[in-house]
């Protein structure tokens, strides 16, 4: 019997934008507590998200780099649940229509052969970390 | 004085016949004397109002200012006002003092208006009678045994009783238009996206819209001048340029094509109310308009569609109220889950809890497609009905509510009956078009509102149509007895 191994990787990668995906707060490791947060991040009543265009540009660049379909219409949806790192009680993520769709990356192995790694999708997502 | 329009008061302030401080003091005195009968205010901001009035007087002295400078108005307690308690009519926010200002209140303040206080409302904008407030029900100034309508009941009652020159409201399923109808005042729900929702505590994000409530269309236009327009802090606000809402307000109505949807005149509409609406429509014919029957075939679907979409969006929007960073927190929480659960169970009233549960269910795995997605598809059909109709006519008219104001307590045990009150208003929010309610007469001494609906971004046209009617009729000038008592 021949077995085929299928390995999936879910990779979370932070984009090196100056501010967050939906708020103007700065990002940066090791900053003083409570200095990199806005009304939107804190889920204050009446606060509304404003999309970071630079994140879109980076996502599309990545998409082109991995030969992917670019979602000309992409949709953000809320994933609702309660958790200590979720002030709004939901995460804003892309589900059915991500910005970057199917793509691939050809990887050269040690023995000189190449193998193609398929990419299912690369959506943009906002978490609180 | 309390019956004067914004234009008249603006002239008096400009000519120094009266100062903003005097005007503000007069309104504060009226509130102190009369509001115990109505409960229309949650917070009266005397000190702040007088400070703002003084600043307005200084500006007016130097010949500057807008027509709103020095005019005392009230804000629905759903708008975040920096430094002033903002409760949303709920125990959940009974200690919430926002450190930021909503765009609507900020723009009105920058236009020079004076804030008398924050008005009472159905909790988190969920209700059609203002009986769902943690701060007690609001009474209708025309008959204090009846409801003022909701959820902007406080704003409507305050304007009708002369406790504010004008007020802001919000409308998700009829919450400006229905209280305006019940209280005999003029209200406008703008096109979705016309007015910024930043700082306007969210109920249903795809339906909510803030708008003016005043004694006349002209007064509403003054408020719209300040309120309307793109806001970069609200990505759902429209970049379509806003207009001068007063420029063409006097344009004649000859050639105006009015559509009357046959579905709005079926069973369930009180016969006297129907007659009042038809009499109002005849007035428009006298002014040169033509009337034709149209059809909005999917009207009945607006109730189930709305009562799936709105609670779904609300259940998500209200998740942020968890006792952690602001608002009500239960005593001695045992652990995180206990804090979430008890803070929310204690902070939210019955109707809010009900809608959160309905919404959570409709969005849950296995039900999302059957409920939320299906409701959104139906929504598109409802919108298409309006788009088609507005290709044939310029404006659509009809009743705002099936009856006049009902008695307090008469529908609180029958939530479905309460929801059915909204039949004529809901579809407007689902489609996102603008609509007004203007006073059109009385039935058994209680006000009846005429609804005027228009195409996307046609607020100036609606205000013009309403204004012309108000130049030829005086329903909007009537004052309830209790308002004359101070």
Image (cartoon, coloured by chain):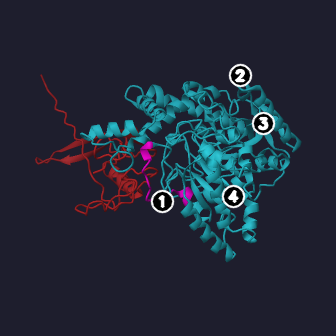
Indicate the chain on which mark 3 is placed.
B
Mark 3, residue position: B442
Is the Cβ of the residue at disc 4 closer than 8 Å to that at disc 2? no
**What separation in Å lies between label 2 and label 3 (alpha carbons)?**
20 Å
Residue A18 on the magenta segment: no
Q: Mark 1 points at which residue?
A: B82
Q: Judge left or right: residue B156 versus residue A51.
A: right
Question: What is the display colour for chain A?
Answer: red
CA gap between label 1 and label 4 equals 23 Å
The answer to whether residue B308 is left or right of residue B52 is left
Label 1 packing within 10 angstroms: few (<14), some (14-19), many (20+)? some
Name which quarter of the figure residue A18 lies in.
bottom left
Q: Which chain carries label 4?
A: B
A118 or A35: nearer the eye? A35
- Stretch in magenta: B91-106
Residue where numbered disc 4 is placed: B222
Q: Decide if residue B335 is on the left or right side of residue A45.
A: left
């Amino acid at each position: 019997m021949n077995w085929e191994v299928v390995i999936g990787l879910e990779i979370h990668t932070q984009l090196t934008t100056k501010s967050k995906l939906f708020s103007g707060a700065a990002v940066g490791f090791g900053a003083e507590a409570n200095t990199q947060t806005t009304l939107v991040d804190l889920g204050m009543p009446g606060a509304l998200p404003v999309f970071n265009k630079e994140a879109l540009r980076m996502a599309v660049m990545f998409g082109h780099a991995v030969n992917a379909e670019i979602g000309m219409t992409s949709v953000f949806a809320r994933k609702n649940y309660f958790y200590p790192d979720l002030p709004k009680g939901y995460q804003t993520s892309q589900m059915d229509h991500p910005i970057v769709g199917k793509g691939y990356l050809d990887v050269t192995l040690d023995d000189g052969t190449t193998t193609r790694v398929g990419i299912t999708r690369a959506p943009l997502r906002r978490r609180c970390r | 004085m309390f019956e004067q329009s914004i234009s008249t008061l603006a002239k008096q302030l400009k000519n120094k016949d009266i100062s903003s401080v005097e005007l503000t003091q007069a309104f504060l005195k009226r509130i102190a004397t009369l509001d115990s009968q109505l409960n229309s205010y949650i917070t009266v901001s005397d000190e702040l109002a007088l400070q703002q009035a003084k600043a307005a007087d200084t500006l007016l002295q130097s010949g500057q200012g807008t027509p709103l400078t020095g005019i005392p108005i009230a804000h629905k307690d759903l708008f975040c006002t920096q430094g002033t308690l903002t409760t949303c009519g709920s125990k959940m926010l009974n200690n919430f003092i926002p450190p930021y200002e909503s765009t609507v209140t900020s723009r009105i303040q920058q236009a020079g208006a004076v804030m008398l206080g924050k008005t009472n409302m159905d909790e988190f904008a969920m209700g059609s009678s203002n009986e769902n407030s943690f701060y007690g029900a609001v009474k209708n100034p025309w008959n204090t045994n009846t409801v003022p309508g909701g959820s902007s009941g406080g704003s409507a009652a305050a304007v009708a009783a002369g406790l504010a020159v004008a007020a802001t409201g919000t409308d998700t399923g009829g919450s400006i238009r229905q209280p305006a109808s019940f209280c005999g005042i003029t209200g406008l729900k703008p096109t979705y996206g016309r007015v910024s929702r930043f700082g306007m505590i969210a109920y249903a994000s795809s339906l909510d819209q803030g708008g003016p409530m005043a004694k006349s269309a002209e007064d509403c236009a003054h408020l719209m001048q300040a309120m309307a327009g793109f806001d970069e802090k609200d990505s759902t606000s429209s970049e379509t340029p806003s207009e001068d809402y007063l420029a063409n307000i006097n344009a004649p109505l000859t050639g105006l094509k009015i559509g009357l949807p046959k579905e709005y005149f079926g069973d369930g509409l009180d016969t006297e109310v129907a007659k009042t609406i038809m009499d109002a429509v005849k007035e428009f014919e006298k002014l040169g308009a033509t009337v034709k029957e149209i059809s909005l075939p999917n009207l009945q679907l607006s109730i189930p569609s709305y009562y799936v979409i709105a609670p779904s969006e609300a259940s998500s929007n209200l998740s942020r109220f968890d006792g952690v960073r602001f608002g009500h927190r239960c005593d001695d929480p045992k652990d995180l889950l206990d804090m979430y659960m008890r803070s929310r169970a204690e902070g939210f009233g019955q109707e809010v809890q009900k809608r959160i549960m309905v919404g959570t269910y409709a969005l849950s795995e296995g039900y999302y497609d059957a409920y939320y997605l299906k409701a959104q598809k139906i929504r598109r059909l409802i919108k298409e009905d309006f788009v088609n109709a507005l290709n044939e006519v310029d404006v659509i008219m009809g009743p705002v509510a099936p009856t006049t104001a009902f008695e307090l307590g008469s529908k609180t045990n029958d939530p479905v009956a309460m929801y059915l009150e909204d039949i004529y208003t809901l579809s407007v929010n689902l489609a996102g078009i603008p609509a007004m309610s203007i006073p059109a007469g009385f039935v058994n001494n209680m006000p009846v509102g005429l609804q005027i609906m228009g195409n996307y971004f046609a607020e100036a046209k609606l205000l013009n149509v309403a204004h012309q009617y108000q130049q030829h009729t005086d329903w909007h000038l009537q004052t309830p007895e209790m308002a004359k008592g101070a």
